[in-house]
Amino acid sequence: MSGDETGRWTTVGTALHETLKKMVKAKRISKREARNMLSNFDDVLAEELAQPPRKMQRANVKGEMVYYQCLDGKWNMKVREVEIAFQDDDGTVRRKLEGKSTVNIVAVEGAS
């Protein structure tokens, strides 16, 4: 089993986990197959996150900080009432999330 299970707490990871639980309950797959799929998900996500970005992009996030934690250079943050502005060579794209949207952000400190 993979040592880094950070991806399981993302929206995609949570959806995958819930779907696999339903499939096991419906006896469409075995518990072993579900564990293997989750392990593969962890490994592939960890590999991809370890790669440098293909295109550098800067993001500015504004909102109400609900929670934050930094452990071994990995930041976990939860922000409510979010406005995100992505900046790249082509210009700036802004996105304001309406309502009581909460965004979970996972960031890894990079080399300077």
Image (tube, grey):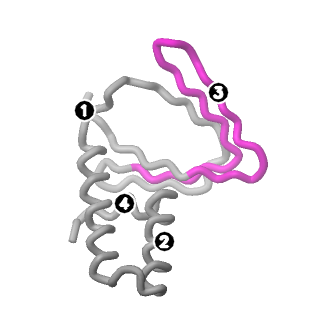
Q: What residue type is labelled 4?
A: Thr
Residue 70, given in percent of the width and then of the height, sits at 39, 53
Q: What element carries label 1?
A: loop
Q: Do the residues labelled 3 and 4 touch (CB within 8 Å)?
A: no
Label 3 or label 2, whichever comes before in sequence order: 2
Asked whether 42 or 30 is in front, the reply is 30
Residue underneath mark 4: 6
Residue underneath mark 2: 19
Residue underneath mark 1: 111
Q: Is residue 13 left or right of residue 53?
A: right
Asked whether 33 or 112 is in front, the reply is 33
From the image, state whether disc 2 or disc 4 is nearer to you.
Answer: 2
Specify few, some or many for label 1: CA neighbours under 10 Å numbering under 14, 14-19, or 20 or more. Answer: few
The boundaries of the magenta stretch are 75-103
> Residue 35 is drawn in which quadrant?
bottom left
Q: Is mark 2 on a helix, strand or loop?
A: helix
Q: How far apart are marks 1 and 3 (CA)?
A: 27 Å
Specify few, some or many for label 2: CA neighbours under 10 Å numbering under 14, 14-19, or 20 or more. Answer: few
Label 3 or label 4, whichever comes before in sequence order: 4
Asked whether 24 or 48 is in front, the reply is 24
Magenta span: chief secondary structure: strand
Label 1 or label 4, whichever comes before in sequence order: 4
Q: Which residue corresponds to the image point at 44% horizontal and 70% vertical from the top-left? A: 17
